[in-house]
Amino acid sequence: MIPRILWLVYGYILVFLTGGTLLMTLFVAPALFLHLGVKKAGEAVGALFPGYFHLLFTGLLVEVLLLLLLSRLSRRPTKALLWTFSAGLLLSGILAFFLGPRASSLKTLHDALPADPALTAAFATAHRESFMANLLILIGLLGGTLSLLSRTIEPPQLGSSSQPSRKKGASESHD
């Protein structure tokens, strides 16, 4: 019973992280830049994404801990998921505690000295690295979600009768 509950919690957190990452990456950030312009959208992204990166790190940490526990309690294979989410945890940690703050500080310097080409190039590189790390995490989350969904609907076992046998005359319809 406990492993089943833990798998449910794992699934809910996974779907939350996947949906949140899809939302932030594919909808929120592009919509901000489309409707607010580069300067205002940059400020909004600078305010929203550090919290998102930390939430992503925390969620992936919980997922890895759940998978470690489930690897001991459950008969389901967890090794591939554990490796995938450990890599995601490492990437999200780099994103939350290194790349994100570095991009933020470079953005502040870039805004103070917009004519400096070295700062512009450094910020563009930091932004590109953050985007690629976030994209890799998104791909891993989508893979984990597809793995979870593929296990949700399991075909009936051959030889097992999951339907009660019909009695003679039960298939006749009465109009």
Image: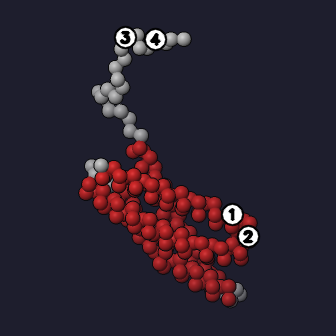
Query: Percent from the top left, x then y, of residue 64?
Result: 36, 63
Q: Are marks 3 and 1 in contact (CB under 8 Å)?
A: no
Give the alpha-carbon distance from disc 1 to disc 2, as whole Å: 8 Å
Query: Secondary structure beneath disc 1?
Result: helix
Q: Looking at the image, is mark 1 or mark 2 earlier in the sequence? A: 1
Please rate how many residues cluster around mark 1, counting C-alpha atoms within 10 Å: few if below 14, some from 14 to 19, many from 20: some
Name the residue: 68% across, 89% down. Answer: 113
- 3D distance between C-alphas at marks 4 and 1: 58 Å
Its colouring scheme is secondary structure
Which-is-in-front pick, marks 4 and 1? 4
- Could you give the CA–CA distance between mark 3 and mark 4, rounded to whole angstroms? 9 Å
CA separation in Å, label 4 and label 2: 65 Å
Depth check, mark 3 against mark 1: the one in front is 3
Q: Which residue is mark 2?
A: 36
Answer left or right for 131 relative to 146.
Answer: right
What amino acid type is highlighted by mark number 1?
Ala
**CB within 8 Å, label 3 to label 4:** no
- Tell me: residue 93, above or below residue 143: below
Q: Given this view, does label 4 or label 2 mark the residue nearer the observer?
A: 4
Q: Is residue 25 above or below residue 149?
A: below
- For label 3, the SS is loop
Identify the secondary structure beneath mark 4: loop
Q: Relative to 81, say whether 153 is above or below.
A: above
What x and y, as percent, mark residue 45? 63, 72
**Residue, disc 4:** 172
Residue drawn at x 39%, y 52% is 8
Mark closest to the chain's N terminus, 4 or 2: 2
**What residue would you read off at disc 3?**
168
| Mark 3 to mark 2 CA distance (whole Å) | 70 Å
Residue 88: in sight, yes or no? no
CB within 8 Å, label 3 to label 2: no
